[in-house]
Amino acid sequence: MNINLFDYHLPKELIAQKPARPRDSSRLLVFDRAKNKISHRHFYDLPDILTDNDVLVVNQSKVFPARLYGKKKTGGKVEVLLTKKLNPSGWQALIGGKNLKIGDVIYFDPSGWQAKIIKDIDGKTKQIKFNKSGAELDRLIETIGHTPLPPYIKTKDSRIIKKDYQTIYARTSGSTAAPTAGLHFTDRILKKLEKKRVKIFKVTLHVGLGTFAPVEVDDIKKHQIHQEWASIDKKTADSLNKLKKAGKNIMTVGTTSARTLEAFADQRGQLKSGSKWVDIYIYPGYKYKFVDDLITNFHLPKSSLLFMVSALAERKNILQVYKKAIAKKYRFFSFGDAMLIVKNRI
């Protein structure tokens, strides 16, 4: 399947640079994939759309400030982007800087904090070892780190952006990118959903930078998907299995929650609990085993996330929906508006 089948033109002015305020005032395009119908709402209408037959699954992963700025012994600037924790003091990281090699030390503020390059993994990707570890290292990263925003967001990093680029239910630190479909939720939305008796469950998938990695092959089937750490506890898996069996509608908030459920579902559509690295790759032709409906943002052209959404609601339908969203001037990507893909609701 050729990647050009997933291309579309997006005017630059529709790339959102900041979230809606309040968050739930963002627009919500509702697409009924069974009837091929669209309605235009706002995210604060979500409790009016859902019923007690719906079950929401959210990703509770928390974005951590993974971008660090340091210096070489000579004073040259070095940028470190933490991508994978290996042990209490060791990380895999993308390193930006000139003439760096194994054995070189990167120095950070506060004084005395440093990291040594101990292994060359792949081009700019290195394994580094800090001279701090565990909780102390985590606190230092939280103190001096910067939020690694997607390249299409031009807003300068700040404390405000750190807060904006985080869901209100984020609990478990580990993501280098936000599960952005969850950014639309507010406390009032959650309270209204609770009154509607919509059950909400939390899973964890630590979003990696591979989320933004361009697909560089013509045949999308040959694309190599990135690994991400995910987990579902036994109580959650058991509850979701019972609700699914009872005929409840499983709706995931974001592609990360959907990937988690599909990665932990066996061929019979039963969820298994546990924690593991997942690299599930979903594109047209894939049959969802557990997920029924999806809340998601609008994704980049030719991206693996667009492939994934197209597997749920068919490529031609999704591209037509995107075309109408552009005509209606919806805001796209991480800080943009939302889309709800449902069946027999409109």
Image: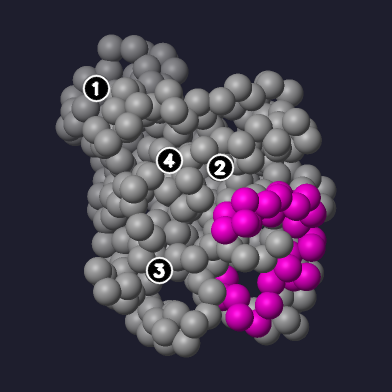
Q: Of the two numbered discs 4 and 1 on the same chain, state the one appearing first in sequence.
A: 1
Spatial distance from mark 3 to mark 1, Cα to Cα?
38 Å
Residue 89, percent across and down? 29, 49
In the image, residue 10 sits, relative to residue 280, either above or below, namely above
Farthest residue to the front: give it.
Answer: 35
Spatial distance from mark 2 to mark 4, Cα to Cα?
12 Å
What is the number of the mark on residue 28? none
State which quadrant residue 191 falls in: bottom right
Identified at 65% across, 61% down, the residue is 168
Give the mark toward the camera: 2 or 1.
2
Spatial distance from mark 2 to mark 3, Cα to Cα?
22 Å
Whether label 4 touches label 3, CB < 8 Å: no
Q: Nearer the viewer, residue 199 or 151?
A: 199
Mark 3 element type: loop
Q: Of the two numbered discs 4 and 3 on the same chain, state the one appearing first in sequence.
A: 3
What is the number of the mark on residue 307? 4
Mark 2 element type: helix
Mark 1 element type: loop
In the image, residue 75 sits, relative to residue 279, either above or below, namely above
Spatial distance from mark 4 to mark 1, Cα to Cα?
28 Å
Identified at 54% across, 48% down, the residue is 178
Decide if residue 315 is in sight here.
yes
The amino acid sitting under disc 4 is Phe
Whether label 2 touches label 3, CB < 8 Å: no
Whether label 3 touches label 1, CB < 8 Å: no
Range covered by the magenta-colored residues: 28-56
In the image, residue 292 sits, relative to residue 282, either above or below, namely below
Which residue in the protein does label 1 denote? Answer: 123
Which residue in the protein does label 3 denote? Answer: 290
What is the number of the mark on residue 317? 2
